[in-house]
Amino acid sequence: MLAFDRERASGPAWSENLSRPRNNMHEKRETSGMSRSDRERSEKALSPTADRCVPEGSDCAVAPLNRPNKEGWALAQAGEERARSKENIVGSDTSPAAGGKRVSQGLDGVRRTAHERRQEKFTALLHHPSVDLLRDSCYALRRKAAPGADGVAWREYKTGLEGRLVDLHSRVHRGAYRAQPSRRVYIRKDDGRQRPLGIAALEDKIVQPAVVRILHQIYEVDLRGFSYGFRPGRSPHQALDALTAGIQTKRVRRVLDCDVQGSFDNLWHEWLAKFLKHRVADPRMLRLIQKWLRAGVSQDGQWPETKTGTPRGAVVSPLLANVYLHYVFDLRVQAWRKKAAQGDVIVVRYAEDFVLGFQYRGEAGRFWSELQERLAKFGWELHAGKTRWIGFGRLAAQNRQQRGEGKPRTFTLLGFTHYCGKRKKTGRFIVWRKRAKKRMVAKLHAVKAVLRRWMHEPAARVGEWLRKVVLGNYQYHAVPGNIDRLALFQCRLRLLWRNILFHRSQKGRKSWKKLNRLLERWIPAPRVPHPYAMARFCAAHPR
């Protein structure tokens, strides 16, 4: 690189035209003459023509000095001044995607088009899953994850990875890629029931995140602001903050706590295909999604044909459920709130769980009946044991006191029990949150089972694992007003570990004084890192 190239790369914006010898007859200049200091520097340059390349800014306007031979419109055109040239000195405005990775220019164009033209149908999307995108999806997988129905683990697939990815990319684009059924497994829920999960094959785990990353560029523009579940850049705490801010600032008197029963299992493929075609018109992309839906799940060597549902646990399933809920629930609620509601209405949805708040009892009843009909039309129904109406808000305690009833009822969302309260200093209404009792009891039972299995393991290893469990629980549940529940969780964990240590041998009993140093090291006291919900919500959404 020459000397003037280095100055040009590091200097400010300057004209691309180089200075030329003057000609008095044709004196349309864009650069001024060189200064004395510039000539002194040019003498030191290696090239004898270095003084032709001087870094400087363009003139604000260029006035032509020569006049054309013809008169008329050519004279006016020639005498028109030329404005200062604009130069591209600003870097790429492509914003990073979820996880800190930068979105490619192609995906950035998809997002811009989806934002500028809300009714646009994308007819060419399948060319975006490149080999690099598949490689990123492969390395983002968990190394020790359970294999799917194909029985292929990540470390086995890593052998000859580049060749495998090129072949996979070719099969996806040629239409020769075949989705495999997910392997059915069950996990235990907090209430003792079994939740079905589907473990996808390894190649499906690689292709699905790449497709989801493309579709996110479209549907992140379309999805409503009160939808928080399984979206990049959104967390459960943001949903909880929005709910708290809505109840505290709006005139909410009735709260509807809803849960769609079997949302993933009862998702109709026919309706989902219609919803996707509103924005995705690429037939190859639609066929690829249909392959995953029709693959279904295999259990005990049997593969039944599936026309409804998407495997819970597949990477693409949360996005498809969000699209389904967007057209079934979100758009309906938004239209009803703008056109039919007379009072305040708030709504927060996290996946299939949503909470609505109403000011008037009559409007709440009308919406309730319309919602049930709407969900039944698309194959869904509300969970009878998890859906209920309660009186909630700043006037709930006063109304129940006038009727001779007790404290206002509570509801649970995302692991927190919400209840009405007041600030001690000001006496103002506030929505307090405590960790749900069922979840804490279930977590203690799970920790107790692991401690029993690791009874004779070294105390340092068990303590290191317990510290991770405790800090993980504190990071999510340590919100203002929940410190007493966290202290109870810490006390119960210390007691459990103490009993396990006592049962290691008949001579293993120690006093609390000797155990305190060990317990304080691995089971620290709780602290509250989260601010109040209203403060964080107002900081994220300033007016």
Image (cartoon, rainbow, N blue to C red):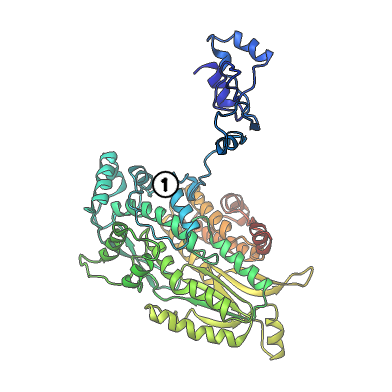
Q: Is residue 272 left or right of residue 48?
A: left
Front one among 59 and 121: 59
Compared with 45, 66 (above or below) is below
Where residue 497 appears, as percent x and y from the top left, is 52, 58
Q: Quadrant of the C terminus?
A: bottom right
Q: Residues within 10 Å of mark 1 (few under 14, many from 20)?
A: few
**Residue occupied by mark 1:** 106
Residue displayed at 58% across by 76% down: 338
Identity of the residue furthest to the right in this view: 426
> What amino acid is at disc 1?
Gly
Where residue 163 appears, as percent x and y from the top left, is 25, 40
Number of numbered discs overlaid on the protein picture: 1
Front one among 178 and 113: 113
Compared with 485, 166 (above or below) is above
Residue 83 visible? The answer is no
Q: Is residue 444 left or right of residue 159?
A: right
Front one among 538 and 535: 538
Residue displayed at 56% across by 76% down: 356
Compared with 63, 149 (above or below) is below
Where residue 475 appears, as percent x and y from the top left, is 57, 56
Where residue 377 appears, as percent x and y from the top left, is 39, 81
Q: Is residue 164 left or right of residue 336?
A: left
On the image, which quarter does residue 183 sit in? bottom left
On the image, which quarter does residue 76 sit in? top right
Residue 240 visible? The answer is yes
